[in-house]
Amino acid sequence: MPQVSIVIATYNRAHLLKETIESIFEQRFQDFELIVVDDGSTDSTSECLSSYGDKLRIWRQNNMGPSAARNFGVSHARSAWISIQDSDDLCAPNHLAVLHDYAKSHPDCGMVFANGAYLSGPEHSRDTIIPADKSRRLAHSGVGLADLFDKSIVRLQAALISKACYDAVGGHDESLRISMDLDLAFRLFAKFPVAYLDEVVFYYRKHDGNIGRNQELRLSENIRVIEKLIAENPQAISLLGKSRIAARLAYRYYRLAKGRRKLGDRLGAKQALQHAIHHRPFYLKYRAYDFLW
């Protein structure tokens, strides 16, 4: 049996998929199976995948979204450890070598994850997705709920997840299309040890097809995930503090309001801003926008 099952869910990314697959096969660690779930692609994805013959385990389904496709792929995985890869990013040569080396010596770990870099070079005035100083701190001091909450630091492309733990928390929430990584990280963290390594193990590709560029959906889902965390884990309130939670939710609603206003949705913007004010009623900035609008 392979030591790791790599799962890729893909939809209409034939022009990027081959480079992703090649980066996986070029890793130092080779004891893995590669499962690709074609989530109803209408481009040349089928031809791209067929060219690899029996080097891949290929499944096809009607378009059900990335979370459902990932769950389907994991359900067919034969390994104890799962690596979930996006179909547009690249694995670094050390990817599984670094993550699996830690996982095999920490079998009780629910997830171990690391850092990533930007394929096109430095972004946001930094070389890595998680800033270097924060990356060193997380590796040295460990990951806390506040670290996951304040910034969405978990990228599943940089993670190795115990299949038993993935199944125990119910896998991905199939109603989510963008914030499913954060949601899964919250649920794993609530029940199992989660570790972080100060290594760059994948390269993130920015392009026009990134679903994360859909700000309305990204912010709406982020709000849902936070509210879900609080509803399912009341202890999170004491760990994070009511003011921290309120500030995060208010800021997300404020950003949602500004995005809607820019698109001409004045009513939607007003409603989102009212939610922001509800969470931080004495914050003058939100009150000022409410007066101006």
Image (spheres, helix red, strand yellow):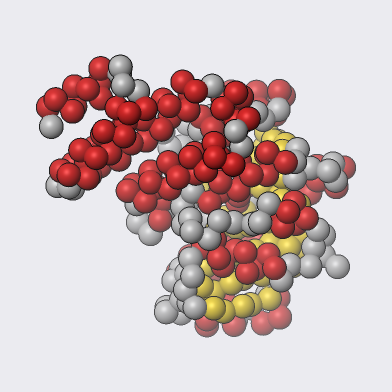
Left or right: residue 68 compared with residue 110: left
Quarter of image, res 190: top right
**Above or below: residue 154 compared with residue 248:** below
Left or right: residue 272 compared with residue 246: left
User: Residue 272: where, in percent of width, then height?
Assistant: 28, 39
**Above or below: residue 244 compared with residue 16:** above
Quarter of image, res 279: top left
- Residue lying at the far left of the rendered structure: 292
Nearer-the-camera pick, 170 or 199? 170
Left or right: residue 262 compared with residue 185: left
What residue appears at the point 51 percent right and 73 percent down from the top-left corner?
39
What residue appears at the point 54 percent right and 40 percent down from the top-left corner?
231
Can see residue 31?
no
Nearer-the-camera pick, 28 or 201? 201
User: Residue 193: where, in percent of width, then height?
Assistant: 75, 38
User: Residue 187: where, in percent of width, then height?
Assistant: 64, 44
Q: Quadrant of the C terminus?
A: top left
Nearer-the-camera pick, 292 or 38? 292
User: Residue 203: where, in percent of width, then height?
Assistant: 55, 48
What residue appears at the point 49 percent right and 39 percent down from the top-left corner?
226
Can see residue 111?
yes
